[in-house]
Image: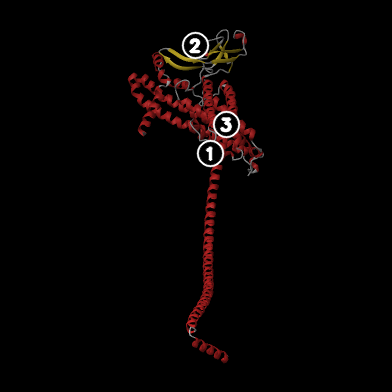
Amino acid sequence: MLKLSKVILLLFAFSIVAFNPLFAQEGNEADSHKKESFDAGEFIIEHVSDSYDWHIISFKDKDISVPLPIILYSKNPELHSGKSFHVFMSSKFHHGHSAYKGFQISENKPNEGKIVELDANGTEIGKPIDISITKTIAEVLISVILLFWLLFSVVGATKRNKGKAPTGIQNLVEPLILFIRDEVAKPTIGDKKYEKYMPFLLTVFFFILVNNFMGLIPIPPFGANVTGNIGITMVLALFTFVITTINGNKHYWKEIYNPDVPWWLKFPIPLMPIVELSGVITKPFVLMVRLFANMMAGHMIVTVFVSLIFIFGAMAGPIAGYAISPVSVAFSVFIVLLDILVSFIQAYVFTLLSALYFGMATADHH
Amino acid sequence: MGLVTPNPGTFFWMLIIFGIVVFILRKFAWVPILTALKDREESIASALNSAEEAKKEVANLKADNDKIILEARKEKDIILKEAKVIKEKIVAEAKEKATQETQKSIVQARQQIQAEKNAAITEIKKQVADLSILIAEKVIKKELSNPGEQEKMVDGLIDDIKLN
């Protein structure tokens, strides 16, 4: 039994790597290799970055991708057929190769990969206000649907099994909820106040966890690097910051502006208040960076191990690429398994630290 | 797109989406689930409590029962003792009564026997007298068949009278 489960696990892990679009891109990369040598850095950055369309597979020289809506607001309507508000599908750009209505995906620094406006001569004049549904946002929406399905089925099950033992998916989710409640919220915030913060803590935990896991599955509609996107983690940290600030009690603010330190640390130069105040900002900032960096790194390392094949292939011919592939696959499997652990830990750490900050903001004077 | 510069569009959408998600989940998922969990915990706790109480009650009942049984046993012993005493008393009384009764009947029997005896004696006496008279008649008849004898007898009787 144990052996069988080990084999299944290995097969599963292998399939994660084997079905990775990165492998599918091999043909494309080989094609470009003829023109220029394989650029691992670009390849990796491309994989972990956001994009305007959802690349599914490249077959020979054809890119197959799902177009996503582009939503733009321009201050120069005269350049874009007289309208300032534009909504169209990303397929109009033909994978970034052509301009549409005076907009184009820039190929030059500093706006590389972003949509820029073109003037009548075709030179870039700056960025419009861009609220497109990118790959990351599309993945967020998918994860939200998944999250709703998961949690509403739990709600249904709790109603169905009222006064009875929990069944099915309830048994999967309820221990996590209880874990957040009993091991995270209660010890950090306190038995009396924790209930107010539970909805946010649980939402953050499940949102991060689901997105971390979805990021590990390389088959569309999964695989986008959501929690490794700094815009996403910034919003999550912003929520923690806002909730902490709104709920901060008198004691919390007193400790920031007038902490219990010798007077010469506060006057004439308010040294400690400055340190404390910067702490208010750095706490959510660290939250943002930690989650972003961890998930980004996980994605990057897997991509690095896979691109090893192509680097060797480019340097010493296809045989070397094939020869190195078992090593790459083994390392990738290891990293993916590690990332499963990291997914849990990062979701837990984000929730725990948020709860700690809430607890600090609402702690009674002692 | 730059990796470490947040994209305003991503930020904008994520803010809206996550805000809505927190709101919806709070209202339709977390509150019902947490309430259900709390209810379940409370019902389990109360069930355990009542089980504990029932256990105690059973123990109490058992103690009560033991007490009752003990008391009942004591009472039984007392009753048995009393019964024994009463029995002995009754037996003694009965014996005495029987003795008295017997005595009485013996006395009665004796009296009756006495009466019967007296009656019988009286009867016998009567019969004896009758017989004697009969015999005397016969003897006298025989004696008086001869006139000499009659005279003698009258003389004799006269003599007797003189003696009186």
Marks 3 and 2, Cα distance to the nearest angstrom? 43 Å
Could you tell me if residue A133 is visible in this image? yes
**Front-most of residues B57 and B41:** B57
Marks 1 and 2, Cα distance to the nearest angstrom? 50 Å
Res A322 → quadrant: top left
Tell me the tag on residue B30. Answer: 3
Residue B67, position as x, y percentages in the image: 54, 57
Chain bearing mark 2:
A
Marks 1 and 3, Cα distance to the nearest angstrom? 17 Å
Q: Specify the amino acid type for callout 1.
A: Glu
Residue A138, position as x, y percentages in the image: 53, 20
- CB atoms of marks 3 and 2 within 8 Å: no
Quadrant in which the C terminus of chain A appears: top right
Chain bearing mark 3:
B
Q: How would you rate the neighbour count of disc 1 (Cα within 10 Å): few for under 14, some for 14-19, many for 20 or more?
A: few
> What residue is shown with label 2?
A94
- Image position of A72 with respect to A214: above or below: above
Quadrant in which the N terminus of chain A appears: top left
| Mark 2 residue element | loop
Q: Residue at x 53, y 44 (%)?
A: B48
User: What's the coloring here?
Assistant: secondary structure
Q: Specify the amino acid type for callout 3.
A: Trp
> What residue is shown with label 1?
A183
- Image position of A65 with respect to B105: above or below: above
Q: Specify the amino acid type for callout 2.
A: His
- Tags 1 and 2 both on a single chain: yes
The label nearer to you, 3 versus 2, is: 3
**Front-most of residues B146 and A358:** B146
- Tags 1 and 3 both on a single chain: no
